[in-house]
Image (cartoon, grey):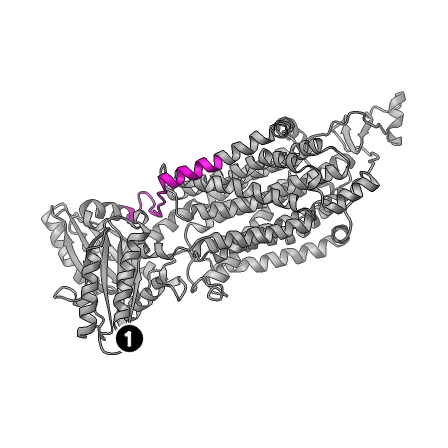
Amino acid sequence: MTALARWCLNHRVVVLVLWLAVLAGTAVAAAVVGSSYSNDYDAPRTESSQAAERLESAFPDLSGDSDTLVWHTDDGTVRASAVENRMTEALERIEDLPGVASVRGPYGSEGEARISADGHTAYASVSFDAPADQLSKDEVQRVLDVAQRAGDAVPGLQVAAGGEGVALTESSSTHLAEAIGLGVAGIVLFLAFGSLAATALPLLTAVVAVGTATSGIGLLSHAMTVADFAPMLGMLIGLGVGIDYALFIVTRHRRGLRDGLPVREAAERAVAVSGRAVVFAGATVCIALLGMLILRLSFLNGVALAASLTVVLTVAASVTLLPALLGFIGTRALGRRERRRLTVDGPGSERPTGFAVRWSRFVERHPRLLGACAAALMALLALPTLALHLGTSDQGNNPATSTTRQAYDLLSDGFGPGTNGPLTLVGELDSAGDRLAFDELPDTLRDTPGVAQVSGPRFNGSGDTGVITVVPDSAPQSQSTSDLVDRLRADVLPEAAHESSLDIHVGGVTASYDDFADVILGKLPLFVGVVIGLGCLLLLVAFRSIGIPLKAAVMNIAAVAAAFGVVVAVFQWGWGSELLGLGSAGPIEPFLPVIMVSVLFGLSMDYQVFLVSRMYEEWRLTGDNKRAVRIGLSETSRVINSAAVIMIAVFGAFVLSGDRIIAMFGIGLASAVALDAFVLRTLLVPALMHMLGGANWWLPRWLDRWLPRISIEPPLEPEEPEVTISAQRAPSLIGLSETPPTVTHHGYRERHDDRAPAEVHVRD
């Protein structure tokens, strides 16, 4: 790391130009090529995926996205001549628009079912010639413009549109969220540094890395399935960890300047010491994210690689671009007062003072009481997690002002809630008996509890595939609809086909989400076990202790559980969701637990590494556990708290993105970071370490010999070491003791005997 930092400082202009060139190159390439995001939630070999594949091959005309136009009037009916003439004309114009394959309206002999029983609501199906993720936003917007003009032309007529294609026009920009997050981060950094130059460096480093990653994710979407929220998720994670990583390195650099080191040497040492911790922390985040690959779901593979790419680039920028920038600003990394004090009073280490020291001593005096309070708080916040319900979060959960929510409500009121999410029954017909059984199936379905309406069957040209549409009497996200899917698969359909070779698959929105959730839940224990195991293995090698990794695993689980409790309360129970503009209460997305667990485990490891590495350093110096915990907490709590405030600001700002999924991530991650930094790492972890004493650092001898040796904090190498011999070790110099002496080099001790901690004098 020292050699890398030295090269970047010596060639800082080259480093800066290279990073800007990479940023510009990826941005231009992404602008030229575009993106190809896909929200394909299908899990391979599930019944819903088989239904979708058969339907697409047998009915190519149904492979494109199908959205809905809904209109409603309180005065009169939709059959009134003014309404009928105006909407018929609008539907004809829409059918002629580019990208529209067909339009099926309510006016005509085959459209009576699209007019509600009271005559106040009607709808038309607009089929596009491509799936929603391949549609142009402009194509969909033209459809909405024609429909809106038709509604404005008739007094009292309300027109709304729903569907995945229409949702493209409601996707909001993250620029406001970015600006707010960066603004708050800048304020926190300035308060911590007191220097505009030092404040700008973490922000600039994070923006360059995240900007490059965002463009790279767009290019990656052409090579594999990448969800449309992956860039926003990557941006959310990248800004948070990128600013934090740079904060830790700049803080160490400023300490070196205050100690009187030249700019070049201070920067080299900052990267050599804190840079190692940053690389280690970034590796834990990537390992946690890449753990999603074991689920073998293409949808999550793209998210894992996209987020990992962002973290890798932020780490790379922190250890290359940042030292180059430190070379540019020189001593301006310190504020004016600090530079003036350095000139007048000379160099001197800044000892931790104020609240950090008092809090550290307070925790040391009352570890049991404070630890119990912290544990109780985490348990209380985690309770809602027991009620976690994974399911379909549909457009009925959108904000009330959105056209998709309005269309959803109009359809639900006029035709029943199941109209927004019909089930599709796809039959494979191999004989005349199969076709006869499929023809008789609608009569059986109409008598099935939970079914509101049945239409079909419809057969393809070769007659080997049939389709029946079933409208439930409950909403797509309702548990009753999921129960209907299970009832059809387990009882109704097998009984209807028992005298034939008929094979029927149940598909549709609810069925596909339920299958996706079942696959994830089935593999979740393995996934969590792998992520925890790899994280603990890294900490075991780094800190050579059994207790440190075990406590980290427990703390990470506690942070995840409490964060999910907050997410359930806000989004599933609806506590404040409407006030935040996040729509109504609804289930949690099936893929959210996996992604949240990956990200939260990685971020939790960050604070564990930065906190415990300082404690471990002090333990190696003194062998005094109480002192190690007290010093480690007092010296790192300020920077950890500053980093946490920055992350909370960045994550919390993404609640303003208007995207429900990103808002879930934002609130969940912000809650986890707040609890992790202010409850776990600065309260529960040090309290437990005080209670456990020297057992924190216990490692069996056989395991110590077997483990490879790595160091997060490398030893310093002063040019002219000042040697101090402990009085209790002095007899060893004349042969009265076999215990080798302990040597102290300007505050850093090199122990020549690793078997037991030695008593030393450490110059502060």
The image quarter in which residue 333 lies: top right
Q: Is residue 75 left or right of residue 430?
A: right
Range of magenta residues: 22-49
Q: Residue at x 81, y 30 (%)?
A: 744
Give the residue pinned by disc 1: 156
Q: Position of residue 493 (x, y in %)?
A: 22, 55
Q: Nearer the viewer, residue 455 or 395?
A: 395
Residue at left 88%, top 21%?
735
Q: Residue at x 63, y 52 (%)?
A: 187
Q: Is 45 placed left or right of 201 in the picture?
A: left
Instruction: Inspect this view and state whether residue 680 appears.
Output: no
80 in relation to 482, above or below: below
> Is residue 506 at all visible to an observer of this figure?
yes
**Image check: 475 left or right of 378?**
left
Q: Is residue 39 magenta?
A: yes
Find residue 702 and report its image quarter: top right
Residue in the foreground of this view, choosing between 484 and 16: 16
How crowded is the residue under tag 1: few (<14 C-alpha within 10 Å), some, or many (20+)? Answer: some
